[in-house]
Image (tube, rainbow, N blue to C red):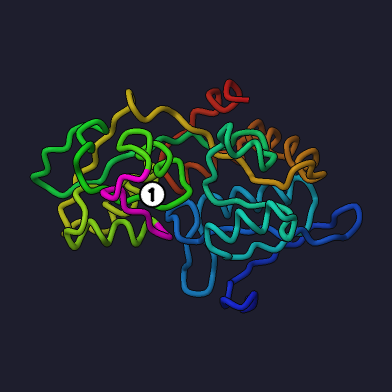
Amino acid sequence: MLAFVGMLALSVSACGKGASGDVYKIATDANYAPMESMDKDKIVGFDVDFLDAVMKQAGLKYKLTNTGWDPMQEYVKKGDYDAGVSSVSITDERKQSYDFSLPYFESTNMILVKEGSDIKSALDLKGKKVAVQSSTTADTLMTEIMGTGNTDLKKYESNTLAFLELDKGGVDAAVADIAIVKEYAKNNPTKKFVLVEDKENFGAEFYGILYPKNSELKAKLDPAIQAIIENGKYAEIYKKWFGEEPNTAVLTGAK
């Protein structure tokens, strides 16, 4: 384990001989349990295990570094890192600045409120104070619903900060990816949070590995992603973290 990059970013390394012996630098924001989070000095989560399986399948060495969300995006865009893995939804807007791997996870956004809230759908958030993590699809969706520049839409550096703002009563709701919302509510049972799902206004999204434009790594990892889905390794990792079988057919349809 190493501390560096000026922010004591934590890294994990994995073996696997690449053709050139290069070690690929991969960034994450380890603040998205159960997808990626810190367990003491170790980065853990579904994305972490998924990445490890993919890199081993491809026979490549890598180092995973916890850089934070906004720095991860900037580092990958500039090519300082070879890839980013952090529950990154594939969107048309992001495709203008990045390349993406094959989709590897289906998600949607979910609303988190306190018990007794009258919020039952995304449209009920109009006129309310809402917390999101900045530069996420939740940010984009809520900006569309609430309007650009709406000061009732509170943007934070992490979902944890958004959830804490809800907990202390600073906002009426928080919006984030479904897996993150469910995990936070599960880990805080005494808070009496209520989960609100709205498939009509929050459609399906798919996560992909984030690459700089014209990355040579995509061609190496796409076959590896397909292989671990087909050989059952993906399902094994999914069941470990979510306790159920994944719908891998939907990933194939989302290509």
Residue at 64% in and 74% down: 5
Task: Point out the image quarter for the N terminus.
Answer: bottom right
Q: Amino acid at mark 1?
A: Ile
Mark 1 is surrounded, within 10 Å at the Cα level, by few (under 14), some (14 to 19) or many (20 or more) other residues, namely many
The front one of 59 and 11 is: 11
The front one of 188 and 66 is: 66
Residue 40 in the image, given as x and y percentages of width and height: 47, 74
| SS class, disc 1 | helix
Which residue, given by chain and number where applicable, does mark 1 sit on? 180
The front one of 145 and 59 is: 145
Residue at 27% in and 33% down: 122
Residue at 57% in and 65% down: 66
Magenta residues, dominant SS class: loop
Left or right position of 63 against 110:
right
Residue at 29% in and 50% down: 151
**The magenta segment:** 149-158
In the displayed structure, would residue 100 be above or below residue 115? above
Residue 150 lies in magenta, yes or no? yes
